[in-house]
Image: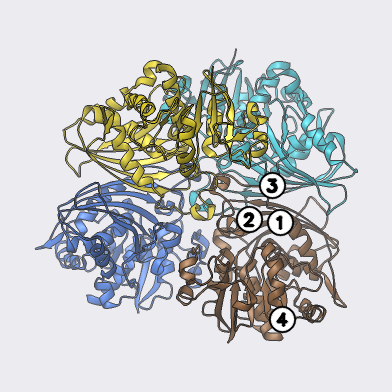
Chain colours: A blue, B yellow, C brown, D cyan
Amino acid sequence: MVNVGVLGATGMVGQRFIQMLDKHPEFELTTLAASSRSAGKPYGEVANWYLDCEMPESVRDMEVVETDPSAVGDVDILFSALPADVARKVEPKFAEKYIVASNASAMRMEPDVPLVIPEVNPEFLDLIEVQQRRRGWDGFIVTNPNCSTIALTLTLKPIYDAYTIKRVYVSTMQAVSGAGYNGVPSMAILDNLVPFIGGEEEKIETETLHLLGELDEGVVKPASFGVSASCHRVPVVDGHTEAVFIELDDEFDIDDVREAMDKFRGLPQKLGLHSAPEKPVVVRDEENRPQPRMDRDMDGGMAVTVGRLREDAAFKNSLRYVLVGHNTVRGAAGASILNAELINEIL
Amino acid sequence: MVNVGVLGATGMVGQRFIQMLDKHPEFELTTLAASSRSAGKPYGEVANWYLDCEMPESVRDMEVVETDPSAVGDVDILFSALPADVARKVEPKFAEKYIVASNASAMRMEPDVPLVIPEVNPEFLDLIEVQQRRRGWDGFIVTNPNCSTIALTLTLKPIYDAYTIKRVYVSTMQAVSGAGYNGVPSMAILDNLVPFIGGEEEKIETETLHLLGELDEGVVKPASFGVSASCHRVPVVDGHTEAVFIELDDEFDIDDVREAMDKFRGLPQKLGLHSAPEKPVVVRDEENRPQPRMDRDMDGGMAVTVGRLREDAAFKNSLRYVLVGHNTVRGAAGASILNAELINEIL
Amino acid sequence: MVNVGVLGATGMVGQRFIQMLDKHPEFELTTLAASSRSAGKPYGEVANWYLDCEMPESVRDMEVVETDPSAVGDVDILFSALPADVARKVEPKFAEKYIVASNASAMRMEPDVPLVIPEVNPEFLDLIEVQQRRRGWDGFIVTNPNCSTIALTLTLKPIYDAYTIKRVYVSTMQAVSGAGYNGVPSMAILDNLVPFIGGEEEKIETETLHLLGELDEGVVKPASFGVSASCHRVPVVDGHTEAVFIELDDEFDIDDVREAMDKFRGLPQKLGLHSAPEKPVVVRDEENRPQPRMDRDMDGGMAVTVGRLREDAAFKNSLRYVLVGHNTVRGAAGASILNAELINEIL
Amino acid sequence: MVNVGVLGATGMVGQRFIQMLDKHPEFELTTLAASSRSAGKPYGEVANWYLDCEMPESVRDMEVVETDPSAVGDVDILFSALPADVARKVEPKFAEKYIVASNASAMRMEPDVPLVIPEVNPEFLDLIEVQQRRRGWDGFIVTNPNCSTIALTLTLKPIYDAYTIKRVYVSTMQAVSGAGYNGVPSMAILDNLVPFIGGEEEKIETETLHLLGELDEGVVKPASFGVSASCHRVPVVDGHTEAVFIELDDEFDIDDVREAMDKFRGLPQKLGLHSAPEKPVVVRDEENRPQPRMDRDMDGGMAVTVGRLREDAAFKNSLRYVLVGHNTVRGAAGASILNAELINEIL
């Protein structure tokens, strides 16, 4: 068993880490770090548990430690659910000694930090060596993308492999859990929606191209098509929905696209990683799916569900679909854990 | 005063007609028609009033009549809130004698039936003469577009007038009232959204181009750009939100687009029609607007609110914005009433 | 294995039956009956699956039969999720030959039909003999109470056993699933609640006293205190919440009441029935629990969660609490299944 | 015109004050006070406007001042929407010189501070003289009750005047706006409800009896029956719903109770105060009303709507009903304004 810890353990994503690491076959959760306000107290006392499952017994009495490398003790991997500003300061300190599998956005675009979806670009892990060499660290940082980007990119990958993508337009309808427990006041969202999520559109537009890019002599060359995103918060608890419009350079048969998505498997599937979904992308043919409440938990929340896959007669070589992905599972904690499982398997 | 009636008076849009016609300065509501089940009874008894204002006193005791030309008596204009299949059968019969201002989709695409937004294409009313001649009717049918189309097209019109539009992608987030009172079960939409609305995408894609087209010797030639729509139902009571992505053929300054929208006025504004909003399109500069609960009632629900107007760096000559329009006011009953006010003024 | 079937298999409660019977260790689901419209077709084709888990593979291709005793074939127990009016007509016909474990309200108050919660009044099953004798049936009907009543009565039982109850006031906040998939339009409940559920208050007031009554020489003598209910529908998908006010005839220590609830076990617990929750009533001490989304799935949805247990200083010998129970699991399908498990064990 | 100001002008209730004072015929809003963070800046810049009407033009450019008696200038009445802890400190300072009409709970239970609903206990204003004498103030403080209490007490008053009340049980279903804009996270309330509102039950139980009490030689003697409250937050934007169970000492005819409520008028109605509703209590006879979204705006939000008025057969001399009142209008800002209108008229 590998000893692991969670940084930012009391927040929404921190809690998902704890839930997903409970009874994990390879990772033993031994360390929970949070702000100094919580340090020294049992987790069960300081955490306001938000998930609709019970808090695992194993963490109830675990003493929370400070978010400091000197406090975490004997662990190999630290999962980071820290806010971006805190992450930027402390993740590099942890990486001097530990493996940091981070869901924070802070370090994603550092040229020597791998931003990875295991099914999409596992080869970016080669950057670890660059990172360690350049920074003189014994540990390293590996990051996963933004929640909306992960779901989008998983569905783009089989298309990207088979065709030349020219344009992607994506309009998101994102769950409130993505903003953290206190992020969206109920007054803001009941009988309403909010057509703005700070920084989200930029992340989708940048990270997607990065993930589908190539690693060339230690440098990531982003993919060269265009991505335009419009992001909206809707009154849904969990599960991001995205309407995707794609223009290709090639002619295509929509059944071939469907098959490419359905048949798509990546390295986690080949290696049989514990958290890997059987199919990264599940295609449904009902006319009114996917729906967040119905499809967010597909394969434990680790698969993305695609529906309404159809040609777009308005434009040449164009198609459209709608996807749903669980934003705090596949889009956050589960993404970091899958990254760590891959690292644990291949490094 | 012009005597008017409402066909389909007990439904959601029928009730909006009644609310908006109450105390109307030109139209006197004298006739309420509904199914034979309700005929012969006082409206207050048969109507399950859904709006959050009180049922107007004036209709409480009004006897409902059958949806039959022989039953409606002394009226000039009939507003139709009928379902499409019923409308297709009975609207032509009413039009033999009466003016039918219809919100139903049934007759919108008939070549001699004007599909009109008064600010956009009032000249299409010239088709009335064609229609009456061809069909030998004393009355006629005039229609307004689908709720999502009206809001979209009002915002496209000032852009279309100043630039050459190449592409429009639109992703809608539509209120449940658009499906009628019983249309969307609560089980389908609480903590959820539904990425499908039957026929809606086709209507948006077809009607928008029709409205922005030209009337040439009695024939409508649709505009020639492409429109692609993805439609989604969200847990919002009233007010449709649409994320719009546009590619132009021209270079543009985003401030000019903003000004074109803000300065946009149409014939209803020039004529000072009773239900005309001061500005058909209201542009807001806050980063998190428009929102349906906050903006749907803009100018009594007759103005469309645009926000997040911004360039789209992903593609050449491209821009994006989000709009909110009230689906049962500007998108339905108010649209038909404004059509009737225009006809009453100019014919 | 006992072969079982579901009557009314396509509805909300019918689907819960199917979900809960999937992989059941004693019951083999072999028959699905629905209206003649669905008969002869595979279940996967006729059922609009509403639950947020996937439809079990085992029923996808199962051919639906008519709701007729001649059509159900080789089964021992039939679970009924029929509407009350249909149940009244057909359940007696099925009972001539089969065991009918019914969630329908139709037969609950028949003097020879046991209305049973296994933890509360298992001895009422003695009525089966009376029923068979009187009606000349080879099978019989056993019923479970209304969803709100089950949750309330499970929490009253340990109090009733230890004290003399004088008054119970209960104000419910009920989930929309209780009305069936199409029961509550979204227009009726978004940003709203509805303070009326037809027949519900009467059921709670009658059934609760019946369940806590005594079986005396084949006749149920209801408990003799008063129950007053006010029922309200709220925008929650699953899980009924009830605010309960109780006046006792005795002095009490609130800690004793807490302990009585916490320690409460019934026959299903003693017998270790498959669907029996470990504790029928789970008491939580957090000040803001129970909450429907957080607590409805307690012990697979079969336990009722109580919180805010406190003295009521306004009145002598009075206390108050709030409960949450899963209305379609413990309050419907799970209740019938637990009844059947008990019958299967003891008869 | 009387010059007035608002303390706590940027919050939810502060905004309601501004909305309701806009175009008020007697009160001229000249002063907006908020925290020092906002002081010195235009209101339109510092206020995050939450209401679904537009911010009144008249306050957009008004400079916000500090919450300090030296800063408010030439005003007669200050409406206080301050949090309780701040109110306790600063309201007495303002009262040295100004009339403070406060919605804060801080001073409500001070023996010399009138807690007043103008229709219920206007005579409590006699305490003003006691207050000024005892404290040596030129101004004074008058308070209105908690939002839930106001609605409840308005409906109890006509019953209390005609009968002897023995018991009141009330179960509330309260809107999220009652907790302020940021009070209830959307994660806490979507597909959920929260059965706890800090301090609310105590306020209802205490204030109701105080309001229905008697002023005897400068001392309030509370009414002597019992009130027991259970309070719940539900996913509704505005409008508190309350299920009320009452036991009387007398026999009654339910039609007489209905008539007493319907005929109930108070001093504000007699004096024709500007914000006084025509009827303080509106009784509806539909079986499924009142509903918050449909009834909260009754008479501009100043009337309370009662429905489901019915006998309670479970207990002797008992009745039940459900009420809806607008929590930030009649339950907060409107309550303070009506108090001020009464003072302005009679003092």
Q: Is residue C277 left or right of residue B230?
A: right
In the depicted structure, whether residue B132 falls above or below residue A201: above
Residue at numbered disc 1? C200
In the picture, which quadrant includes the N terminus of chain C?
A: bottom right
- Identity, as a three-letter code, of the amino acid under mark 2: Gln
Residue at numbered disc 4? C139
- Identity, as a three-letter code, of the amino acid under mark 4: Gly
Residue A8 in view here? no
Chain of residue at mark 3: D
User: Do tags 1 and 3 sit on the same chain?
Assistant: no
Q: Answer yes or no: do the residues labelled 2 and 4 have beta carbons within 8 Å?
A: no
In the picture, which quadrant includes the C terminus of chain C?
A: bottom right
Residue at numbered disc 3? D201
Chain of residue at mark 4: C
Q: Residue at x 52, y 34 (%)?
A: D11
Q: Residues within 10 Å of mark 2 (few under 14, many from 20)?
A: many
Residue D68, image x, y percentages: 53, 25
Residue A266 in view here? yes
Residue D260, image x, y percentages: 82, 33
